[in-house]
């Protein structure tokens, strides 16, 4: 186990941030490097390592976290670190310029100092990484103008101390004539002459008015995550060279004491079950399935050609085939044994004896070459028996449109035929590997 893995499984005697030792600082540095280099998420229950990781992330990247100083981690909780790479390519449509309204989305004049803000899809990703759920969003302006929108957003998240907290933010955009936002757009327009500046300012204002509601909605969501240190805009150089590192608490139920950990995990399951029951009702009590009838069991046995189902239902042992003794030239074991020509009951005599007895064996139906022959006829080869078994089994379990056309009479017929073929296969003591089937 590496040093980093050991630190992940180590719990300090006290829950809270104490002095960060050099080994803990080194482990935090290694964990953050692994996250930045290729990992998607890493978590730790050690507050010392978590504090060191946030310190490194704040210096080298854009850190979004609620914990700005000392904090305490509740038992069963960990801090998860996730990363988010922002694509500043204008074709990705994740960011837009707020410092140059003339080239808002084209990116022709973007440089390292261009201020960029986030479009709605990127804001949704940031909210997901931070664990903020948008509960409600309400329009609160007087709705007297289509150029003025103001929204009130309500979000919920789990704080580092394990408690649920509520975020409330109000954001909007007013682009009516004479409003501060409209005057700012007109004042920041670029041009060689005053007339050119005025034309470009009106053009920029018309483009912004076309999506005034979307911009107001995005502004409201931006303000929801401002409490995490999120800024309304970043320079292109920052987003190109740095990652956004998001920190959020997750409840895993981990605790060094196995008994306490078991209790914490059970509490998590109980809370989730209670929420589900409150929404959809408690699930019905589990009961054993009803027992199937003997007729149904026999039908299943006939369809599968096996006794396993019936034996499981009745608890009886599986039937075994009677042992067939092999005669020798010196010893004959009588009727039912495998005779040889030199024993006291030759093969031809056995055939005569059997031929004299009435034969009530099943007659093979159908259109095949074995049609009309009795199932125990020597002309019925093992290959024919296995082919019949396959044909009858497929007839009982058809696919596609044939399944709907199968009636009870056909099932009974093929089940009976399959049972007769299976009996003959067992009587001859045939095995599947002896044939091409």
Image (tube, rainbow, N blue to C red):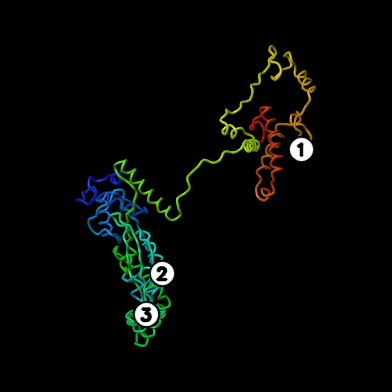
Rendering coords of residue 309 (x, y %): 59, 35
Tell which circle, 2 or 1, labels the residue nearer the N-terminal end.
2
> In the image, which disc is placed on residue 175?
3
Residue 389 falls left or right of residue 352: left
The residue closer to the viewer here, 399 or 170, is 170
Q: Which of marks 3 and 1 is nearer the N terminus?
A: 3
| Dot placed on the residue nearer the N-terminal end, 3 or 2 | 2
The mark found on residue 90 in the picture is 2
Quadrant of image for the C terminus: top right
Residue in front for this viewpoint, 121 or 354: 354
Q: Name the residue under label 1.
A: 365
- Residue at the image position 27 percent from the left and 56 percent from the top: 54
Say few, some or many: other residues with alpha carbon within 10 Å of mark 2 (under 14 / 14 to 19 / 20 or more).
some
Q: Is residue 110 above or below residue 412?
A: below
Q: Is mark 2 on a helix, strand or loop?
A: helix
Mark 1 lies on a secondary structure that is loop
**Cα distance, mark 3 to mark 2?**
24 Å
């Amino acid at each position: 186990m590496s040093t980093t893995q050991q630190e992940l499984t180590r719990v300090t005697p006290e829950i809270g941030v104490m002095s960060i030792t050099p080994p803990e600082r080194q482990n935090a540095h290694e964990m953050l490097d692994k996250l930045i280099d290729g990992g998607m998420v890493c978590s730790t229950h050690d507050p010392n390592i978590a504090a060191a990781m946030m310190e490194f992330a704040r210096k080298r990247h854009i850190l979004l976290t609620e914990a700005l100083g000392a904090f305490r981690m509740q038992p069963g909780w960990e801090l998860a670190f996730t990363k988010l790479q922002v694509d500043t390519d204008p074709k990705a449509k994740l960011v837009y310029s707020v410092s140059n309204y003339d080239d808002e989305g084209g990116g022709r004049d973007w440089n390292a100092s261009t201020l960029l803000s986030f479009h709605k899809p990127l804001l949704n990703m940031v909210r997901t990484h931070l664990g903020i759920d948008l509960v409600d969003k309400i329009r609160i302006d007087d709705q007297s103008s289509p150029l003025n929108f103001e929204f009130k957003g309500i979000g919920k998240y789990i704080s580092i101390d394990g408690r649920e907290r509520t975020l409330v933010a109000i954001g909007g955009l007013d682009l009516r004539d004479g409003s501060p936002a409209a005057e700012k757009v007109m004042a920041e327009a670029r041009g060689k002459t005053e007339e050119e500046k005025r034309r470009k300012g009106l053009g920029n204002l018309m483009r912004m008015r076309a999506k005034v509601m979307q911009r107001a909605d995005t502004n409201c969501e931006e303000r929801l995550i401002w409490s995490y240190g999120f800024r309304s805009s970043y320079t292109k150089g920052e987003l190109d060279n740095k990652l956004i590192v998001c920190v959020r608490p997750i409840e895993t139920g981990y605790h060094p004491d196995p008994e306490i950990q078991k209790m914490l995990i059970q509490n998590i399951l109980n809370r989730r079950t209670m929420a589900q029951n409150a929404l959809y009702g408690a699930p019905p009590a589990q009961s054993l399935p009803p027992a199937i009838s003997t007729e149904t069991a026999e039908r299943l046995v006939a369809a599968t050609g096996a006794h396993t189902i019936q034996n499981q239902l009745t608890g009886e042992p599986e039937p075994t085939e009677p042992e067939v003794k092999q005669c020798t030239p010196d010893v004959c074991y009588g009727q039912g044994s495998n005779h040889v020509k030199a024993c006291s009951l030759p093969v031809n005599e056995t055939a005569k004896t059997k031929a004299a007895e009435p034969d009530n064996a099943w007659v093979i139906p159908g259109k095949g070459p074995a049609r009309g022959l009795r199932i125990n006829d020597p002309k019925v080869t093992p290959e024919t028996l296995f082919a019949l078994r396959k044909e009858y089994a497929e007839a009982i379990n058809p696919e596609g449109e044939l399944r709907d056309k199968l009636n009870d009479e056909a099932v009974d017929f093929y089940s009976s035929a399959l049972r007769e073929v299976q009996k003959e296969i067992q009587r001859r003591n045939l095995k599947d590997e002896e044939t091409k089937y």
